[in-house]
Image (cartoon, rainbow, N blue to C red):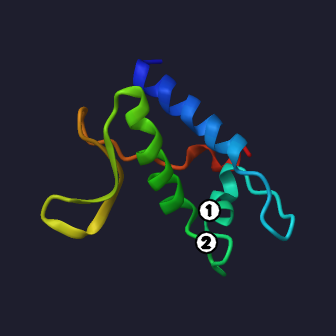
Amino acid sequence: MDEFQQILFSTLRQMDMEAGRTASGVPTGLSWYGGFLEPSKKRPRTEVCWSRRLAQLLPQYGYPAKAEVAYPGQRHLKCDIACVSAIWRNICLILAHTS
């Protein structure tokens, strides 16, 4: 596993730990992270919430990142995370099924 992958999984573990329960007591974790960050929404956007939080956390480890960046020439298609110091990486929600 390369350095970026180790940092990514460490950051996802951090996010899983910080996502406790919604105001109504429903557990969130990574699989319902949108419910943690957007509790007032009827349909929280878990994938967008992941992307935005990762974009906040990754720079702490030396990976400047932007969330929901449009692909060049395709403004309606977006990359979840663009690490500006590395190649473009589209991070999939592979851990959602393990929570």
Q: Amino acid at mark 2?
A: Pro
Q: Is residue 84 above or below residue 24?
A: above
Task: Name the residue located 66 percent from the left edge and 50 percent from the top edge.
Answer: 30
Q: Residue under label 2, please give it.
A: 44
Secondary structure beneath dot 1 equals helix
Q: Residue 37's mark?
A: 1
**Image mark count:** 2
Which residue shows up at 29% across the image and 66% down it?
77
What residue appears at the point 41 percent right and 47 percent down from the top-left corner? 55
Disc 2 crowd rating (10 Å Cα; few below 14, some 14-19, many 20+) is some
Question: What is the crowding at mark 1: few (fewer than 14 residues within 10 Å), some, or many (at least 20)?
Answer: some
On the image, the x and y values in percent for residue 86 come to: 25, 32
Helix, strand or loop for disc 2: loop
Q: Position of residue 4 (x, y in %)?
A: 41, 26
Q: Residue at point 55% right, 68% down? A: 45
In this view, the mark in front (1 or 2):
1
Tell me the tag on residue 70: none
Q: Residue furthest right?
A: 25
Q: Relative to 94, is 59 above or below? A: above
Check contact, mark 1 vs mark 2: CB within 8 A.
yes
